[in-house]
Image (cartoon, rainbow, N blue to C red):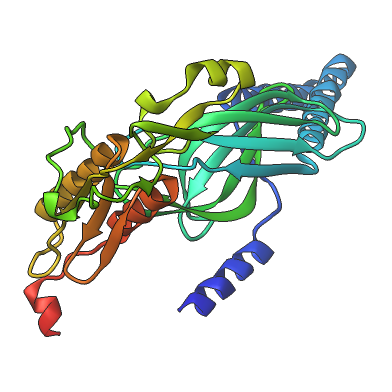
Amino acid sequence: MSDARTLRGRIRRWLRPPRTLRPTRAGWLFFALTLGVGFAALNTGNNLLYLVFSFLLGFLVLSGVLSEAVLRRVAVRRLLPREAFAESAAPVVIEVENQQSRIASFAIVIEDLTGHDVFRAQGLGRSFFLRVGPGERERRAYTLRPEKRGALRFAGFRVSTRFPFGLFAKSLLIDAPAELLVYPAVDPARPGPANTATRLAGEAQARTHGRGTEAAGLREYARGDSARSIHWRATLRRAQILVRDRERENQSEYRTLLRTRGTADGAVFEAAVRRAASEVIAHLDAGFRVSLATDHELVAAGDGYRHRARLLTLLARVEAESSAREAA
């Protein structure tokens, strides 16, 4: 199936012209004016009308040449956010590089496309670049707001311009496949009570990252650390966020349970996944060691950014297992 899809994509690229040209409203009016002047010149034989007609045709040729110069050797790169949550805004950075040595690119619109095929993809967002000088790079960002959790596939870019006169919209397609894992939507949640059965023994000190009574040094801030552990003086002095690395006797653990067996895909299951993600983030931010259990998987308790990503990745990919599916 994937081989057939790849073959169809290659055939489309061979048959499709390297540029697409679409007249704007001003372009259609200019076409009508040019045809009108041409018919008048043929009917009257007036040399002045022939001169104006030639000028209008040359204007069209100049528009095509300049717009082609804008799109030549333009490289586009996508910088995805570190985290993206469903129903929440996340910035996606578009970087454009003009690889020409003498000619600048003007009035470029970059549209990011999602789907499996760049020729049938849908637009996610766009960025406008007024001028990219020769050999220069420019970055712009657009706001991505995913509708649901799971893998979001990017197909490529549509690069277009109306430079120089706004008569035509010339565009080209660039293949740039990528994938972004969208985490479940989350809601504000308050941390619940710790599970006393999973508390660490109080007789022996555990050197762990988090809140405690004895400071063990400073380290760089990681996602999931409590804001109360930030050392503001050192942060201002070193121009980077630093947190206190502490020793603590009791480190609370919290386990989130998500039922997947005997459930069906739909709003009810998605709401359960959303609640689980909200609990995970709330307790990690509060300094808990958090574990996550489904009917088939178990992620042991931990903290820090890597553990946070591990838990959210499981929640982003988890699927419901209905009774009919289990029987099959």
Residue 72 at least partly seen:
yes
Q: 249 or 21: which is nearer to us?
A: 249
> Residue 265 location in percent, x, y?
15, 61
Residue 90 at least partly seen:
no
Q: Who's the residue at 61% across and 20% down the image?
A: 239
Q: 295 or 321: which is nearer to us?
A: 295
Q: Who's the residue at 65% across and 44% down the image?
A: 77
Q: Who's the residue at 73% across and 44% down the image?
A: 75
Q: Hey, which quadrant is residue 50 in on the image?
A: top right
Q: Who's the residue at 83% across and 29% down the image?
A: 62
Q: 287 or 147: which is nearer to us?
A: 287
> Residue 91 location in percent, x, y?
48, 33
Q: Is residue 81 above or below residue 107?
A: below
Dividing the image into 4 quarters, which one contains the N terminus?
Answer: bottom left
The single residue placed furthest to the bottom in the displayed view is 328
> Residue 37 location in percent, x, y?
73, 21
Circle count: 0
321 relative to 74 in the view: left or right: left
> Residue 181 location in percent, x, y?
41, 52
The single residue placed furthest to the right in the displayed view is 102
Dividing the image into 4 quarters, which one contains the C terminus?
Answer: bottom left
